[in-house]
Amino acid sequence: MTDHVTTHQAAEDARNEDILIWLNGRVVPKAEAVVSVYDSGFMLGDGVWEGLRLYNGHWAFLSEHIDRLFEAAKAIDLDIGLDTAGVIQALEDTRAANNMTTDAHARLMVTRGVKTRPFQHPGLSRQGPTMTIIMEHSKPSLPRPIRLATVPHIRGLPMTQDPKLNSHSKLNCILACIAAEKAGADEALMLDINGFVNTTNACNFFIVRKGAVWTSTGDYCMNGITRQKVIDVCRADGIPVFERNYSLVDTYGADEAFLTGTFGAQTPVSEIDGRQIGTGEMGDMTKHIRALYKDLVAKDAAKS
């Protein structure tokens, strides 16, 4: 597709060629930010990550993001090697080194570190964790609303790979994204184990029907921070919002649909499985929620 877009589409910024990256306690040029082929993350996807967004000198909802990182690390029995204050300091050091004040996105990644031999057992990772922060100048630049295609790949049960875990092992979602692209869409709409609408391969998913906002139960999707903030602002504003099971039939008949994520906040959806959603443009409810979310970010910044 010549007009393929992604939910992480950003305006080109030449400054990103010269960014500095935090790697294991040092801030180094992009070309020097390399890890071993024996690293657990490269070899096995053994690690966790977190995405954060900088607005006017403030990392939005920082405490929630850091808490989620440490919770994920605990879940996979990974010692990050820093406490909360240390991680925040690393983030701030990287921001200062790159002279970033707003419209920046950070990807903070921690793996189990370098292995002594190229095999699976976590006990072979004996040299301590690998931690890096990639921070880019990044202003969302979406030329049109997103097109989705439903795919056969699902988000599974907690006893397989818990979908709430922000892990480096993203192959299931990547395969879903590939399937959607092959179908002529931008991103994949994934169902849950019961066939109800769940999430996309990269973002949480919402629809609007007759003035009410619907999203999945949350049982089989990432515990998105932006997702929860949208639910919160809807409740505070008196907008009916439901975490519920619903089908593709409900989805195709929606008045609006949008995605949520740290990078793009609220991204409009124009089409699902070849069916136009609403007018095919960003709807009034989505615009209203975007405004409410922007106000919430400002309030969060004022508290710090």
Image (cartoon, grey):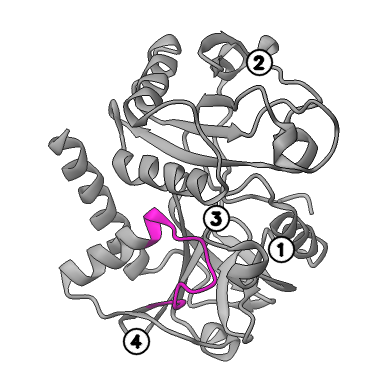
Name the residue that disc number 4 marks: 210
The prevailing secondary structure element of the residues shown in magenta is loop
Name the residue that disc number 3 marks: 165
In the rendered view, would you say 263 is above or below 145? above
- Spatial separation of the CA atoms under disc 3 and disc 2: 25 Å
**Mark found first going from the N terminus, 4 or 1:** 1
For mark 4, does the 10 Å Cα neighbourhood hold few (<14), some (14 to 19), or many (20 or more) residues? few
Magenta region, residue range? 214-227
> Which circle, 2 or 1, is nearer the viewer?
2
Label 2 with label 1: CB-CB less than 8 Å: no
The quadrant holding residue 194 is bottom right
Tag on residue 53?
none
SS at badge 4: loop
Q: Residue at x 28, y 29 (%)?
A: 56
**Mark found first going from the N terminus, 3 or 4:** 3
For mark 1, does the 10 Å Cα neighbourhood hold few (<14), some (14 to 19), or many (20 or more) residues? many
Q: Residue at x 54, y 59 (%)?
A: 145
**Mark found first going from the N terminus, 2 or 4:** 2
Residue 62 coordinates in the image, percent (x, y)? 32, 38
- Spatial separation of the CA atoms under disc 2 and disc 4: 50 Å
**Mark found first going from the N terminus, 3 or 2:** 2
Q: Tell which of 276 and 199 is nearer to you.
A: 199
SS at badge 1: loop
Q: Amino acid at mark 3?
A: Leu
Residue 144 coordinates in the image, percent (x, y)? 56, 55
**Mark found first going from the N terminus, 3 or 1:** 3
Name the residue that disc number 2 marks: 33
Report if residue 281 is visible in the image.
Answer: yes
SS at badge 2: loop
Q: Residue at x 68, y 58 (%)?
A: 186
Label 3 with label 2: CB-CB less than 8 Å: no
